[in-house]
Image: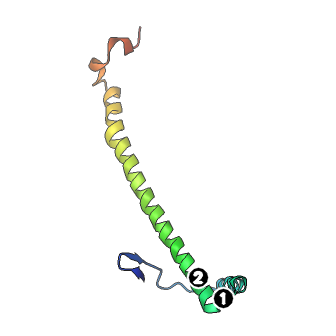
């Protein structure tokens, strides 16, 4: 768990062990950033770490937004639209349909 501020907590996997290839890839990214910006290895690693943390926070916000959107869509479809359709299909609302909308035989 990483505590960024009192109101925001990001949970990270506890036993996340990097493979040699992953570690070398991250090392190469740090070196490239260090050379590009002319900063220390520590600062370059910190920048990459903070960038990854921001990506995780954005991912969490997106997930929460999609969950809210899904909840709203479910509520609209299943509680507001679906029941009248079922009532019409079962013939319970035929008496309230105006004559000009009813099918001509």
Q: Is residue 87 above or below residue 80?
A: above
Label 2 crowd bin: few (<14), some (14–19), many (20+), radius 10 Å:
some
Q: Give residue 64's position: percent from left, percent from top.
A: 42, 62
Callout 2 touching callout 1 (CB < 8 Å): yes
Question: Is residue 18 shown to the viewer in this render?
Answer: no
- Horizontal side, residue 72 vs residue 52: left or right: left
Q: Which mark is residue 60?
A: none
Q: Using the image as rendered, state which of residue 34 and residue 98 is in the foreground.
A: 34
Query: What residue is rendered at 50% in x and 67% in y?
Result: 59
Query: The C terminus is located in which quarter?
Result: top left
Q: Earlier in the sequence, mark 2 or mark 1?
A: 1
Q: Is residue 81 above or below residue 25?
A: above
Query: What residue is rendered at 54% in x and 71% in y?
Result: 55
Q: Using the image as rendered, state which of residue 47 and residue 13 is in the foreground.
A: 47
Q: Give residue 38's position: percent from left, percent from top.
A: 70, 87
**CA distance separating discs 2 and 1:** 10 Å
Question: Is residue 58 shown to the viewer in this render?
Answer: yes
Q: Which residue corresponds to mark 1?
A: 39
Which quadrant of the view contains residue 47?
bottom right
Q: Using the image as rendered, state which of residue 41 and residue 80 is in the foreground.
A: 41
Q: Give residue 90's position: percent from left, percent from top.
A: 32, 27
Q: Closer to us: mark 2 or mark 1?
A: 1
Query: What residue is rendered at 32% in x and 15% in y?
Result: 98
Query: The N terminus is located in which quarter?
Result: bottom left
Q: Which residue corresponds to mark 2?
A: 47
- Horizontal side, residue 19 vs residue 98: left or right: right
Label 1 crowd bin: few (<14), some (14–19), many (20+), radius 10 Å:
few
- Horizontal side, residue 29 vs residue 54: left or right: right
* Mark 2 element type: helix
Q: Give residue 72's position: percent from left, percent from top.
A: 37, 49
* Mark 1 element type: loop
Q: Residue furthest front?
A: 38
């Amino acid at each position: 768990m990483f505590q960024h501020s009192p109101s925001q907590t990001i949970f990270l996997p506890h036993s996340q062990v990097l493979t040699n290839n992953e570690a070398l890839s991250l090392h190469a990214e740090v070196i490239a950033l260090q050379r590009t910006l002319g900063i220390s290895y520590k600062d370059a690693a910190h920048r990459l770490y903070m960038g990854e943390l921001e990506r995780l926070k954005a991912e969490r916000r997106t997930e929460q937004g999609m969950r809210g959107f899904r909840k709203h869509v479910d509520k609209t479809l299943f509680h507001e639209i679906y029941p009248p359709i079922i009532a019409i299909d079962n013939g319970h609302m035929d008496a309230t349909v105006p004559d000009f909308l009813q099918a001509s035989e």
